Amino acid sequence: MSRTILVLVGGFLGAGKTSLILAAAHMLEQRGIRAAVILNDQAGSLVDTELARRRDVSVDQVTGGCFCCRFHDLAAAAERLLDANPAVIFAEPVGSCTDIAATVVQPLVRLYGGRLHVAPFTVLVDPSSAVQHECDDLAYLYGKQIEEADLVRTTKADLHPEAQISARTGQGIVEWLQEVLAGTTTGGSRLIQVDYGCYARAEAVLGWLNFEGMLRSKPAAPAEVVGPLLDKIVALSCAAGVVLVHCKAIGSAATGYVKAAVTANSLEPDVEGDLTASPSTRHRVLLNLRGLGDPDSLRRIVDEALDSLPGEWLERRMDSFRPAAPVPAYRPG
């Protein structure tokens, strides 16, 4: 196609959106098809952006709000990436957002259809995730995400044989790419009715924390920083009665990086990167945590976990909050 294809991939927190996008981008690059990625978060210091850069993926980001509320930032990010003439741009909205078809996909089709072909909107589902059913408002949000999807795909097939896609093994990715890149249909066809009061309450159930810091320590491998940090956060969360929805950290040193993530208090972390990287005395650490707990509790947990690491924090920046009510730039009705 003459136009760049924009592929939006949504789904609840921890569903595997970034993992699928990066795996798909790598698969396309191996076939000589240039791909780029736009990531999205309510705050800055994104683990996923650092991971994409570490994997040599062309990446931009929209922070400070979801795509719908930061639509013009999304358009600006797409414009920057289009300068490199990618064949495909993947875009990942915040995992606590819905009404994407009406507030993001349809405006993109209307305003940028001459430069972008917007592919069918995919929403991912983790078969093992149950936290979205912890309260009626989260269940409402989760249901709306699925209701507006042009395509629904279940993830983590390496753990759940009944699922359709695995970013780890590559299962189902080629078939999914063939469907979204065919160019025969445009995304955003399933417009839904959303109660924005309920939507806002659902997002406000979640505490949000993003951290970035520089640790100076005795020689240690990145895994020896990230592993104990995540283990401590899980232990402290369990003790405080905080339910982790998605917690991920990446530690980067001159010798390599390690990224680890959990999507529940009881699950083993999913780890990737260079587990054999040589020790280093300086580590840049990014941490993104979303949980069923108030922001102050999340901050206390993370502060204690950070303090438990041997060494000295040369830099330490943290932002904890509850997401504000969504106010889309292009709100239907």
Image (cartoon, helix red, strand yellow):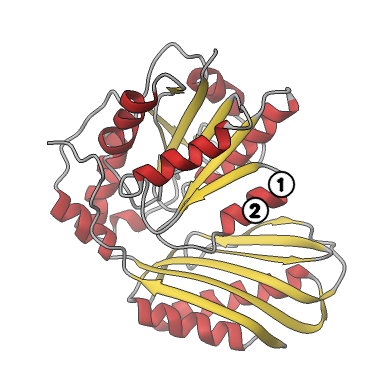
Question: Going 74% across and 83% down the picture, which residue do you hit?
Answer: 216
Q: Which quadrant of the view contains residue 68?
A: top left
Nearer to us in this view, 61 or 47: 61
Q: Which residue is mark 1?
A: 55
Q: Position of residue 66 (x, y in %)?
A: 36, 51
Question: Where does label 2 land, which residue?
Answer: 51
Decide if residue 157 is in sight here.
no
* Left or right: 310, with 198 as reference point: right
Q: Is residue 181 above or below residue 205?
A: above
The image quadrant of residue 315 is bottom right
* Spot occupied by residue 119 in the image (x, y as percentages of width and height): 44, 23
Look at label 2 and name its amino acid.
Leu
**Marks 1 and 2 in Cβ contact (< 8 Å):** yes
> Crowding at label 1, few (<14), some or many (≥20) Cα neighbours within 10 Å?
few
In terms of depth relative to the viewer, which is nearer, 328 or 30? 328
Q: From what the image shows, is residue 16 above or below residue 236?
A: above
In the rendered image, which quarter contains the N terminus? top right
Q: Quadrant of residue 325?
A: bottom left
User: Is residue 12 shown to the viewer in this render?
Assistant: yes
